[in-house]
Image (spheres, rainbow, N blue to C red):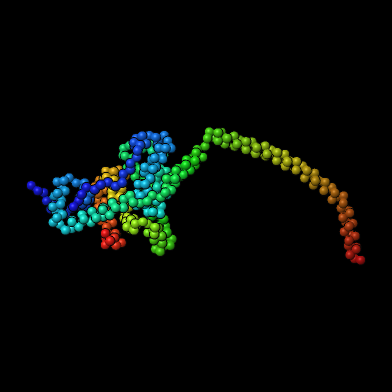
């Protein structure tokens, strides 16, 4: 029966958020270093689930390159955690649009033979096959549903935090989570995961 | 009085129930319905299973060892590029000075080349007049030469 779920991985830093933020705004190298250390792991994992493994490292770098100069404009309306997820979401959205455009262009040029050109392949060195399959299944979800499911079920953000990141109402977030999960179940079944569970 | 939900659960209710984000009284009423409705039972258990699977992969993704260094390197590179792009004040002074120097340099060069061309014109006129004079004076010689050659050929 349903139980209250625990949150996903939370980012803990020895420096208080306000102090860290202030020092980062002053471009204190030590503070910038701990800012990156605090968020790089969770953001990298989030980017992997949203955009796939191939470009994850570059995109994570891009997130921090955008976030660090923008720290001066951070008003503190949301938590730093939510804010960095918002930056990452925007970077991933841009990447997704670029990929889609590239796919469209290649379709126009070469016909349907190139549809699979950008598809992620299963990494042979992946320690967990299940993880790889889940990543592939997530890639097949429509973008808004993928965002909602990953932010909720993988990153452990609350509905309110997701509304701040994605920019829509709680009802919409819940609905996206529902349909995203339903489709993900279907995808995993198609990939034969259900039998192995 | 116990509340029993008569209708099937809406998508948002399923999500809230699975995530444990529902008031206890409402949750109990929904549980009553789920116990009787196989469709809702399947929907809820399906989502709960999925959430459990997703939770098992949380945090298990290895982060590349060079990620931190990569971010620092790119940050340093971007800053260096920005610093280069942001020109210091002396460059704003240097640019007009160089432009003025070029302008005056070109003007002086044009003046000098004007002198050169005037000189060349005079010289060429003098040369033409000299050659005309020479042609007139040597006309006889050339006639003679021609006659001589003609004669020679006759021999």
The quadrant of the image that shows the C terminus of chain A is: bottom left
| Residue at image location 31% in from the left, 61% down from the top | A191
Q: Is residue B1 left or right of residue A12?
A: left
As rendered, which of B15 and B88 lies closer to the eye?
Answer: B15
Toward the bottom, the furthest residue is: B155
| Residue at image location 57% in from the left, 35% down from the top | B94
| Total residue callouts | 0
User: In the displayed structure, would residue B18 be above or below residue B103?
Assistant: below
Asked whether residue A105 is in view, the answer is yes
Q: Is residue B136 left or right of residue A126?
A: right
Q: Is residue A91 left or right of residue B48?
A: right
Residue A16, given in percent of the width and then of the height, sits at: 34, 36
Asked whether residue A95 is in view, the answer is no
As rendered, which of B149 and A4 lies closer to the eye?
Answer: A4
Residue A176, given in percent of the width and then of the height, sits at: 27, 51
| Residue at image location 41% in from the left, 50% down from the top | B64
As rendered, which of B57 and A22 lies closer to the eye?
Answer: B57
| Residue at image location 37% in from the left, 57% down from the top | A126
Residue A141, given in percent of the width and then of the height, sits at: 31, 55
Residue A88, given in percent of the width and then of the height, sits at: 36, 46
Toward the right, the furthest residue is: B155
User: In the displayed structure, would residue B34 be above or below residue B130?
Assistant: below
Residue A107, image quadrant: bottom left
């Amino acid at each position: 029966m349903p139980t209250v779920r625990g949150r996903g991985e939370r980012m803990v830093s020895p420096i208080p958020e306000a102090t860290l933020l202030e020092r980062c705004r002053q471009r204190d190298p030590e503070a910038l270093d701990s800012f990156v250390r605090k968020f790089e792991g969770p953001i990298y994992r989030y980017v992997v689930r949203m955009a796939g493994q191939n470009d994850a490292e570059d995109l994570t770098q891009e997130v921090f390159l955008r976030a660090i100069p923008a720290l001066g404009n951070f008003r503190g309306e949301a938590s730093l955690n939510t804010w960095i997820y918002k930056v990452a979401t925007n970077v991933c959205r841009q990447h997704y649009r670029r990929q889609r455009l590239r796919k469209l262009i290649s379709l126009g040029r070469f016909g349907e033979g190139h549809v699979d050109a950008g598809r992620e392949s299963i990494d042979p060195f992946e320690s967990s096959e299940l993880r790889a399959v889940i990543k592939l299944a997530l890639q097949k979800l429509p973008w808004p549903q993928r965002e909602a499911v990953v932010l909720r079920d993988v990153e452990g953000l609350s509905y309110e935090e997701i509304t701040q990141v994605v920019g829509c109402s709680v009802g919409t977030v819940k609905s996206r989570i529902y349909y995203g999960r339903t489709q993900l179940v279907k995808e995993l079944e198609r990939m034969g995961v259900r039998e192995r569970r | 009085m116990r509340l029993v939900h008569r209708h099937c659960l809406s998508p948002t209710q399923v999500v809230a129930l699975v995530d444990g984000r529902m008031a206890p009284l409402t949750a109990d009423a929904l549980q009553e319905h789920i116990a009787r409705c196989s469709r809702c039972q399947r929907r809820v258990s399906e989502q709960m299973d999925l959430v459990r699977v997703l939770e098992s992969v949380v945090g298990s993704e290895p982060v590349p060892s060079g990620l931190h260094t990569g971010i620092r390197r790119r940050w340093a590179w971007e800053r260096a590029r920005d610093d280069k792009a942001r020109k210091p004040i002396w460059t704003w002074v240097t640019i007009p000075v160089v432009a003025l120097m070029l302008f005056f340099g070109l003007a002086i060069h044009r003046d000098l080349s004007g002198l050169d061309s005037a000189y060349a014109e005079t010289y060429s006129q003098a040369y033409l007049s000299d050659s005309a004079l020479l042609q007139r004076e040597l006309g006889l010689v050339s006639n003679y030469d021609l006659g001589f050659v003609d004669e020679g050929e006759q021999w």
